[in-house]
C-alpha cells in the first residue's frame, strides 16, 4: 500500500491517490465506492490532493478528478522537500547554539528521523549511515539533496535498499548481531555522532557532539561493514 504520510498527505489521501491512478479520471462517488469509504471522505481526500498538487479537476459536472502521474508526483514531492530542507537549514544556521545539550537521548523511529534531518542536513563533510532501510528511505530527500550538492554520503542498510537516491550496501542483520551482540544503529555526520540499537519499530540511543560518541559511531560502522 502506498504511504504518502511522511510527505504531508493523510492516509486517506494516499489511498485515494493510489486508487485514482488505477481508475483513471473518476468522480468522488466512484472512488468512494471502489474503496468502500464514505463519499464525503473521498471528496475531502480528493480536494486535499488537488490542493497539494497531486490531482486536478478535469470536469465540473459531475466533478471528475485525475491523478498526477506517479513520476510527476515524485518530482513534486522532491522539490517541496528540498525547499523545506533549505528553509530548515537557514533557520538552524540562525539559531544560537549557546546552551544546547551535547548529549540527547532518542527513542523510536520518529525521534531518530528528526535527528537525521537535524544532523545530515547541516553536515558539509562526509555522512555515514548504518540502520534500517525503511528509515533511510524516509530520509530520501536529504540524500537526494546531498547527492545533488556533491557531498560524500555512504549508506549501509538492513533490508531492501531499492528506491534510495544513493547507492546503498545491504547488511545482513545476522552479521551485525554476530559482530555487536545487538542490532546497531549509527550515523556519523561532521562533528556529530548518533549511536543506538534496535530495529525500525524499536529504536533507542543517543545523539551527541561529544567526540567519544562520534568515534564510537564510526567504529561501529567499520566493524559491521568490514567484518
Image: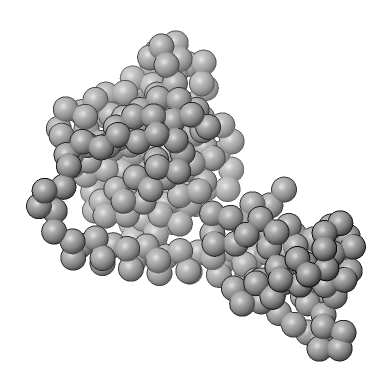
x%, y% of residue 170? 51, 31
Q: Is residue 68 visible?
A: no
x%, y% of residue 63? 82, 83
Horizontally, residue 101 falls left or right of residue 26, namely left
Horizontally, residue 37 falls left or right of residue 51, namely right
x%, y% of residue 167? 48, 44
Q: Residue at x 45, y 49 (%)?
A: 139
* As drawn, 207 above or below 152: above
> In the image shown, does 32 or 163 lie closer to the viewer?
32
Q: Residue at x 51, y 21 (%)?
A: 173
* As drawn, 1 above or below 196: below
Q: Residue at x 31, y 23 (%)?
A: 220
Q: Considering the image in quadrants, where does the C terminus appear? A: top left
Q: Count of labels shown? A: 0
Quarter of image, res 224? top left
x%, y% of residue 223? 33, 20
* As drawn, 55 above or below 15: below
> How is the model colour-coded?
one colour
Horizontally, residue 124 falls left or right of residue 67, namely left
* As drawn, 136 above or below 92: above
Q: Is residue 62 visible?
A: yes
Quarter of image, res 197? top left
Residue situated furthest bottom in the rendering: 60
Q: Residue at x 30, y 34 (%)?
A: 105
Amino acid at each position: 500500500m502506498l504511504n504518502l504520510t511522511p510527505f504531508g498527505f493523510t492516509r486517506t489521501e494516499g489511498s485515494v491517490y493510489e486508487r485514482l491512478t488505477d481508475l483513471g479520471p473518476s468522480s468522488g462517488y466512484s472512488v468512494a465506492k471502489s474503496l468502500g469509504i464514505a463519499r464525503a471522505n473521498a471528496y475531502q481526500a480528493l480536494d486535499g490532493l488537488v490542493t497539494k498538487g497531486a490531482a486536478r479537476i478535469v470536469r465540473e459536472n459531475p466533478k471528475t478528478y485525475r491523478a498526477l502521474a506517479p513520476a510527476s508526483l515524485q518530482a513534486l514531492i522532491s522539490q517541496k522537500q528540498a525547499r523545506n530542507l533549505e528553509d530548515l537549514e537557514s533557520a538552524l544556521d540562525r539559531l544560537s547554539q549557546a546552551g544546547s545539550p551535547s548529549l540527547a537521548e532518542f527513542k523510536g523511529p520518529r525521534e531518530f528521523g528528526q535527528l537525521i534531518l537535524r544532523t545530515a542536513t547541516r553536515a558539509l563533510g562526509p555522512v555515514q549511515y548504518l540502520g534500517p532501510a525503511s528509515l533511510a528511505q524516509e530520509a530520501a530527500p536529504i540524500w537526494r539533496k546531498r547527492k545533488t550538492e556533491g557531498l560524500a554520503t555512504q549508506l549501509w542498510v538492513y533490508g531492501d535498499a531499492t528506491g534510495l537516491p544513493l547507492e546503498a550496501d545491504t547488511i545482513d542483520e545476522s552479521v551485525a548481531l554476530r559482530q555487536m551482540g545487538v542490532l546497531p544503529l549509527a550515523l556519523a555526520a561532521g562533528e556529530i555522532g548518533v549511536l543506538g540499537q534496535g530495529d525500525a519499530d524499536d529504536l533507542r540511543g543517543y545523539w551527541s557532539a561529544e567526540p567519544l560518541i562520534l568515534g564510537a559511531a564510526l567504529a561501529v560502522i567499520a566493524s559491521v561493514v568490514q567484518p
